[in-house]
Image (tube, grey):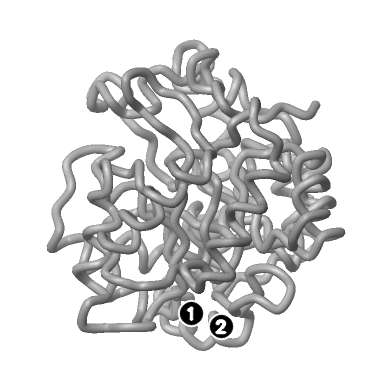
């Protein structure tokens, strides 16, 4: 009954609690939809199921989609484009560029490359303008000031509405914001990855940027069920991730099981309570959990109806204290391109 009540009230709650993507930016629900899974990142995709999920998102008041040109080599954008073709202006859409996978993965923030990527993304999405455009990974050899100038030109041309940066250090935001306001900074943020609290949450607040939290459910670990690592597809990110390798995985599962039991004792799903925790950390935080299942999206939307009390937040902190996770959040290979700042 509790979960049904959460879902039934979620649409109203989403409308009441909308947050800006940057100072003066578009208002979106505090929980959006990450669309990496539409590109097959966590297994084969089903376009019909993805479209059902997008339709359910609209029903629930989830109005912000986050994708990238690298998600399935454009498949995620094509899936979204096919859905919005007959539903223009139904979502606030963000996409990203800056990762070049060939011949080997590297980062390109040059004006020519970003322009080509943007034009391709707009074509796949079937739009002339995207609300938010991120640099997916920063090219370290190129000054961020130069990259910002490129993005400002795109904005002046009407191709993008706002500028975003992904997986950067607070110092990079400081430099970028001196050129032009940054609307959003994307970073992994959840109960098991709290590095943004060491400076990025605060830097975003100072500069009027939204902190867009990806993987807010710990790459599935906080969803209430645990992945079976041996059965994951070879290309699944988690296969090579230290937190999913033993003995780390068993230790993480044990800690999170106690949190899941506590969430259920309050009448909440673990996923909805984990999301409610993320968006409660600051008024400029927006979470973008990923799913391609309409049924799962109903569960995630339950977070809209949860107001964590001081006592509940203290208990969550006791069950999953800062830094509880065993293992690094990335392997040495996976962390390539991520800016470290502590």
Q: Secondary structure at mark 2?
A: helix
Q: Quadrant of residue 56?
A: bottom left
Q: Please tell me which residue lies in front, 336 or 159.
A: 159
In the image: residue 113, left or right of residue 203: left
In the image: residue 100, left or right of residue 126: right
* Any part of residue 5 in sight: yes
Residue 270 position, x and y percent, is: 50, 52
Task: Identify the residue under disc 1.
Answer: 10
Q: Quadrant of the C terminus?
A: top right
Residue 71 position, x and y percent, is: 33, 44
Q: Which mark is residue 281?
A: none
Residue 311 position, x and y percent, is: 79, 59
Q: Please tell me which residue lies in front, 335 or 56.
A: 335
Rendered residue at 67%/44% (across/down): 146
Q: Please tell me which residue lies in front, 306 or 150.
A: 150
* Any part of residue 260 in sight: no
In the image: residue 48, left or right of residue 309: left
Q: Secondary structure at mark 1?
A: helix
Q: Quadrant of the N terminus?
A: bottom left
Figure check: 264 above or below 309: above
Q: Quadrant of residue 170?
A: top right
Task: Identify the residue under disc 2.
Answer: 13
Figure check: 325 above or below 117: above
């Amino acid at each position: 009954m509790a979960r049904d009540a959460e879902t039934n009230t979620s649409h109203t709650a989403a409308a009441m609690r909308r947050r800006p993507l940057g100072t003066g930016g578009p208002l979106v629900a505090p929980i959006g939809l990450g669309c990496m899974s539409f590109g097959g990142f966590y297994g084969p995709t089903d376009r019909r199921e993805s479209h059902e999920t997008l339709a359910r998102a609209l029903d629930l008041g989830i109005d912000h989609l986050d994708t990238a040109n690298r998600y399935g080599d454009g498949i995620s954008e094509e899936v979204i484009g096919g859905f919005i073709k007959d539903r223009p202006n139904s979502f606030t859409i963000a996409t990203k560029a800056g990762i070049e996978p060939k011949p080997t993965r590297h980062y390109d923030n040059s004006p020519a490359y970003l322009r080509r990527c943007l034009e391709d993304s707009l074509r796949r999405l079937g739009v002339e303008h995207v609300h938010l455009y991120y640099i997916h990974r920063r090219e370290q050899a190129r000054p961020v000031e130069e990259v910002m100038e490129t993005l400002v030109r795109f904005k002046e041309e009407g191709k993008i509405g706002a500028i975003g940066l992904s997986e950067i250090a607070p110092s990079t935001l400081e430099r970028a914001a001196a050129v032009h306001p940054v609307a959003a900074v994307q970073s992994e943020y959840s109960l098991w990855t709290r590095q943004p609290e060491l400076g990025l949450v605060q830097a975003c607040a100072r500069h009027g940027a939204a902190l867009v939290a990806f993987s807010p459910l710990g790459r599935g670990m906080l969803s209430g069920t645990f992945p079976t690592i041996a059965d994951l597809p070879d290309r699944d990110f988690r296969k090579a991730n230290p937190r999913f390798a033993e003995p780390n995985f068993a230790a993480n599962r044990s800690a999170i099981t106690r949190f899941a039991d506590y969430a259920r004792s309050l009448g909440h799903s673990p996923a909805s309570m984990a999301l409610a925790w993320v968006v409660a950390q600051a008024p400029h935080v927006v979470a973008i959990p990923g799913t391609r299942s309409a049924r799962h999206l109903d569960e995630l939307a339950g977070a809209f109806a949860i107001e964590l009390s001081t006592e509940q937040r203290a208990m969550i902190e006791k069950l999953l204290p800062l830094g509880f996770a065993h293992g690094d959040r990335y392997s040495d290979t996976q962390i390539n391109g991520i800016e470290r700042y502590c």
